[in-house]
Image (tube, helix red, strand yellow):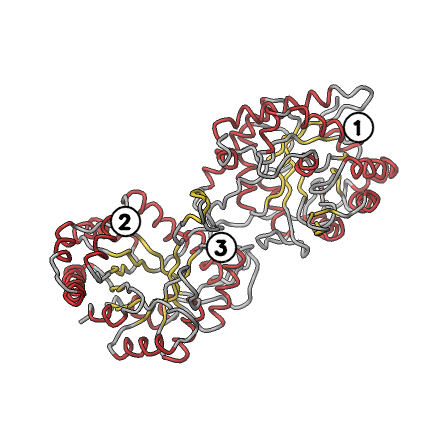
Amino acid sequence: MKPFLDALAERVLVCDGAMGTMLYGKGVFINRCFESLTLTEPDLVRDVHLQYLRAGADVIETNTFGANRMKLRAFGLGNRVAELNEAAATLAREARDGVNGAPRAYVAGAIGPLGVRIEPWGKTGVDEAESMFREQAAALAAGGVDLFVLETFRDLNEIRAAISAVRAVSSLPIVAQMTTEEDGNSLDGTPPEQFAPALVTAGATIVGLNCSVGPAPMLETIERLADVVACPLAAQPNAGRPRDIEGRNLYLSSPDYMASYARRFVTQGVRLVGGCCGTTPEHIRQIALAVKAMGPSLTAKAAGAGESGATTTPHADVAHQPNAVSATPMVEKSPLAARLVARQFVTIVELPPSRGYDVAGALAAAAMLRERGVDAVTIPDGARSGARLSALALAVLLRQQAGVETLLQYSCRDRNLLGIQSDLLGAHALGLRNLLGITGDVRSLGDIPDATAVFDVDSIGLTNVISRLNHGLDIGGQPIGAPTAFLAGVMANPSRDLDQELKRLAYKVEAGAEFIVTRPVFDVAAFERFRARVVPFGLPLIVGIWPFDSALHAEFMANEVPDVTVPEDVVDRMRRTETADAAAAEGVAIARELLAALRPMADGVHVFTLTGRVARSAEVLG
C-alpha cells in the first residue's frame, strides 16, 4: 500500500463518518465511555469500521476521540490510556485488513480535545496538555496507525499543543481540524485566516474543519482556508444542524445533499473529505461515489488551490499579538487605580446585594460609606442564596445613583468564556472600570456529591480575557475597536500552602493582574510570610479584614471555611463575650487591632461584610 501522502497526491481520499452517533444508534447510552467499548464490546466498534469500509471509506478513524487521560479519568480509566488507544488502533487495522475484495484503507489515530481549558484560559498548563496528548499519540503509534487526525478543537493553543505532542513521538502525517461557527471563526472567535497558517507553522500536514456546522457554511470557510495556506485541506461537516423531532435530536442532511457539497469541497482544494456527527455509512457511500465520478484530473487540479497562501505565527504575549493596541496606563483607568499607583492607602468596604430588586437600602449604605471617606465599595458576585440582584447591575446603579466608586467582583462560576467576554464588554459600556476577578466557589449540587457548578475558565483565564480586552482584542485575537480600560484585580490567600498559592498568583500577574486583594486575614505572622514572597511582584497589596459577628461566626470561620486560619486565642476572645452586642463589638475591636498591625505592610484594606452589616464593617475603619 502506498504511503498516505502519496495516495493523497494522486486522488481525493474519503474519510469515514461519525463513530459516536453510530454507537449511540446501536443502543449505547450517552453516559457510557464510548472509547472503553473497544475493550468491553469490540464487535460493536468493529462493525462500525466495517460498515464505513464497505461504503468506500479510504480512511477510518480509531475509536479514541476522548481517549486521553483527562477525559478517561471521569470514568475511572485514567490509568488505561495506553491500553485503550493501542487496542483501538489494532482493532481498526484488523477491520481494515479483514475486508475481502475491498481496497486497503488507512487507519487514522483520532485525538480530540482534553475537555478542559488550558492556559491562558484555564489552569491546565500547555506542558501538561502536551504530556497528555503525547501519551495518547505514543499509544496510537504503537498500535500501528498510518496518520493522526486531530479534530473538533476550538482553542488554537490546545490544538498546537496536540500537534507538538504528536510530532514528539511520530513523523506520520497530521490532519489538524478546527471546529467553527457559521461565520467561519472558531468557537473561541479565531478566524481561519489566523488559525490555518498557525496550524501549518505548528507542524500540521493537512488543515481543515470538522463538526459544529453543516456543509453549506463549512464550504465558505474552506474557501477562506484555501486563500491563506498552500497545504491540502480536509472537510468533515456534520449532517446539518441537529433538529428536535419529537424529543429526539436528528441530523436531517441527506446523503445526496452531503455528496453534492463534497464535490464543491474538492474544487476548493479539499483532499480529504468525510463526515462528522450524524453522518452514516450511506452518507459516506454517496460521498465516495461523487468524488470518484469527478475523476483524477479534476481532483489533482484542486490539489494546487491556495498555493499563494501566507503563513504567520501569532505571538503568545498579548501586547505583541497581531492587531493588539497599547493598553491604557493604569493611573488613567480610575480614581482607585490612581490612588494605587501613588501608593496611597485605600479603603474598600464590601456591600453585598440584598434580596429582591429594591436598591434603596444599598444606595443609602453606599452614601454612608462615601460620607465616611471610603474609597470604593466592592459588590460581591456569585451569591446563590435566594433571589438577589446581580453584582454587575448593582455596581452600575451605585455608581450612577450614589456617586460611589465601585469594585465589581466577577466570578467565573456558571459562566462560559464567551459569556464572560460579553459581560465584561457590557460592564465597560456602562461605565464600570474596576474589576476583582475570582474563580468562584465549587459547590455540590443536589444529592450528587461529585456534581458541581459550571466552570469554563478560572480566575487566571479571566485575567487573560481582561488583558486581551484592554489591548483591544477579543478572546480569538480579533480587534474589538477601542480597547477597554479595566483595572484588573485578583485575589490571593495568605493561609493556603504558599508554594501553591504563589504559583497561581504568578500566573495571574503574568496574565495582567494589577493589584492583589487577600482573603480574610486573622493571623499577622501568616500575612508577614505571605507579603515577603509577594513583594517581588511589585503590585499593590490590599489586605482583607473580616469582623466577626458572633462566637458562632468565629468558630465557623476557624473550623469550616477551607484555607482560612483563625488563631485559637482570637476564637477564645469571641467565646468569652456574653451578649450579641458584646460579641459584635469584640469582633470590630479584633478587626481594628488586626488592621493596625497590618496597615504598615499593606497598600490598602478590604473589609468583608455579612449581609446587612455594612455599618459594622465601616466601624473597622474608625
Location of residue 342 (image quadrant): bottom left
Q: Earlier in the sequence, mark 2 or mark 3?
A: 3
The kind of residue tagged 2 is Glu
The structure residue drawn at horizontal position 60% and vertical position 43%, both measured from the top left corner, is 199
How far is the residue under mark 2 from the one under mark 3?
Answer: 45 Å
SS label for mark 1: helix
Q: Is residue 465 left or right of residue 331?
A: right
**Where is residue 216 shown, x and y percent of the image?**
76, 52
> Could you tell me how far apart the alpha carbons at marks 2 and 1 are, in whole angstroms?
62 Å
- Give the numbered dot on residue 320: 3
Along the line of sight, the residue nearer the viewer: 413 or 375 = 413
> Badge 1: few (under 14), some or many (20 or more) residues near its Cα, within 10 Å?
some
Query: Which amino acid lies under the numbered mark 3 shown in the image of this protein?
Result: His
Residue 438 position (above or below residue 143)? below
Q: What is the crowding at mark 2: few (fewer than 14 residues within 10 Å), some, or many (at least 20)?
A: few
| 339 up-or-down from 462: above or below | below
**Of callouts 1 and 3, the N-terminal one:** 1
* Quadrant of the image containing the N terminus: top right
> Could you tell me if residue 227 is visible in this image?
no
The spot of residue 368 in percent (x, y) is 28, 78
Residue 356 on image: x %, y %: 42, 71
Disc 1 marks a residue whose amino acid type is: Arg
Q: To which quarter of the image does residue 302 belong?
A: top right
Q: Which mark is residue 54?
A: 1
Q: Which residue is denoted by mark 2 in the rendering?
A: 560
